[in-house]
Image (spheres, helix red, strand yellow):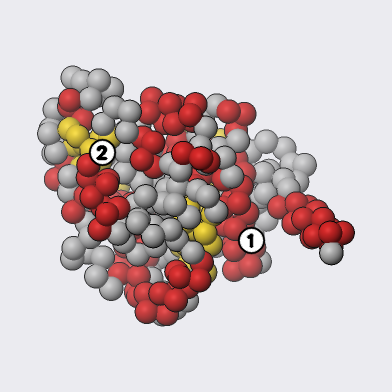
């Protein structure tokens, strides 16, 4: 039995190991949308084949850096992991964050304006490739979201029916009551935060309180240096985004209509609070919430930011396996 277990582990390792490809070609790209510009980091892998492009959508107070976390030898880069395995990525800053257009009034940044902007990015990619970089066009596009970025991906797919798949991390259908209360408790006006002092004046733009980023991690599975780096790169959200659950989420997931994967940390403070998530528990909810079907994976011993936990490759491998299964 021990030999079988070792052999199985070796097969899994070979299946998910990065092939010996050249480094991806990456560039910053800006896509014009009605609300202004959506900035993104586009990475074209050395050998994309006919694989779908992943458009990566971060959650509140995160930029595209969530998917390509700087430093640490690239250990926390989902984009690099996928690029090395032949998948091109476009990690965007949502409307109102990072280098994308930040409307003067935060009320303009909400679930619907975010979904419209993402839809326009999808349309631009289908019409002319990604910013003209590499000259590649894509027959299929998958939206890969994290946290609120998953909600935006769901809303985009359910409203415009313009993508071929949705991967949602740090999200199932909506936060628990305690999870939503926890998120609200760690937010304060961005204008009061040293990182944004004098740069943001509208009090409806918020960010996490100084030293509160650990809310998004399971402490037993997180590197304190990563949490510190997360604090130094945090961004903003709008109060309009924190009110997205009602009525926007009502029945939303039932209208996605494309292959869907959900990956959550076992101890996600936003979704799995107070009860830890289990695959069996989530799978029982799938028929009602995802009539078109959805696969579920729970990353053990992980918190909300599954890509930034020590065992992030567990979630990365689940996403890679799903992509290979759905888009061969």
Q: Tag 2, which secondary structure?
A: loop
Q: Is residue 100 above or below residue 178?
A: above
Q: Going 21% across and 30% down the picture, which residue do you hit?
A: 190
Q: Is residue 82 visible?
A: no
Q: How many marks?
A: 2
Q: Mark 2, residues whose alpha carbon is within 10 Å: few (<14), some, or many (≥20)?
A: some
Q: Picture coordinates of residue 315 (x, y %)? A: 56, 52
On the image, numbered disc 2 is attached to which residue? 186
Q: Picture coordinates of residue 265 (x, y %)? A: 48, 53
Q: Going 36% across and 40% down the picture, which residue do you hit?
A: 215
Q: Is residue 43 above or below residue 278?
A: above
- Image quarter where the N terminus lies is bottom right
Residue 201 vs residue 226, the one in the foreground:
226
Residue 3 vs residue 109, the one in the foreground:
3
Q: Left or right of 92: which side holds 17? A: right
Q: Going 37% across and 50% down the picture, which residue do you hit?
A: 269
- Image quarter where the C terminus lies is bottom right
Residue 238 vs residue 187, the one in the foreground:
187
Task: In the displayed orientation, state which residue is furthest to the right.
Answer: 3
Per the rendering, the mark at residue 321 is 1
Q: Is residue 187 visible?
A: yes
Q: Left or right of 107: which side holds 283? A: right
Q: Nearer the viewer, mark 1 or mark 2?
A: 2
Q: Going 52% across and 59% down the picture, which residue do you hit?
A: 298
Q: Is residue 256 above or below residue 111?
A: below
Q: Picture coordinates of residue 192 (x, y %)? A: 17, 25
Q: Tag 1, which secondary structure?
A: helix
Q: Picture coordinates of residue 112 (x, y %)? A: 23, 57
Q: Earlier in the sequence, mark 1 or mark 2?
A: 2
| In contact (CB < 8 Å): disc 1 and disc 2 | no
Q: Quadrant of residue 271?
A: bottom left
């Amino acid at each position: 039995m021990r030999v079988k277990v070792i052999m199985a582990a070796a097969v899994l390792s070979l299946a998910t190991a990065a092939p010996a490809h050249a480094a991806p070609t990456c560039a910053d790209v800006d896509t014009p949308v009605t609300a202004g510009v959506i900035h993104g980091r586009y990475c074209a892998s050395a050998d994309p084949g006919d694989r779908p492009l992943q458009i990566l959508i971060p959650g509140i107070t995160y930029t595209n850096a969530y998917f390509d976390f700087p430093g640490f030898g690239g250990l926390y880069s989902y984009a690099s992991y996928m690029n090395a395995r032949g998948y091109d990525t476009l990690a965007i800053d949502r409307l109102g964050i990072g280098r994308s257009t930040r409307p003067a009034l935060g009320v303009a940044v909400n679930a619907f304006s975010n979904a419209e902007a993402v839809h326009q990015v999808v349309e631009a990619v289908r019409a002319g490739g990604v910013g003209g970089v590499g000259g590649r066009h894509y027959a299929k596009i998958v939206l890969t979201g994290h946290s609120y970025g998953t909600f935006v991906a769901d809303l985009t797919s359910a409203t415009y029916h313009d993508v071929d798949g949705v991967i949602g991390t740090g999200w199932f259908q909506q936060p628990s009551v305690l999870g939503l209360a926890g998120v609200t408790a760690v937010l304060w006006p961005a204008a009061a935060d040293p990182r944004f002092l004098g740069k943001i004046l509208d009090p409806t733009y918020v960010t996490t309180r100084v030293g509160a980023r650990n809310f998004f991690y399971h402490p037993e599975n997180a590197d304190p240096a990563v949490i510190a780096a997360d604090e130094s790169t945090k961004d903003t959200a709008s109060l309009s985004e924190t009110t997205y659950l009602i009525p926007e989420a009502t029945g939303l997931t039932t209208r996605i209509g494309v292959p869907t994967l959900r990956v959550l940390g076992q101890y996600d403070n936003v979704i799995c609070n107070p009860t830890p998530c289990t695959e069996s528990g989530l799978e029982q909810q799938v028929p009602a919430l995802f009539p078109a079907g959805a696969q579920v994976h729970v990353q053990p011993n992980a918190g909300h930011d599954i890509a930034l936990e020590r065992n992030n490759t567990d979630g990365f491998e689940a996403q890679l396996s799903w992509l290979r299964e759905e888009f061969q």
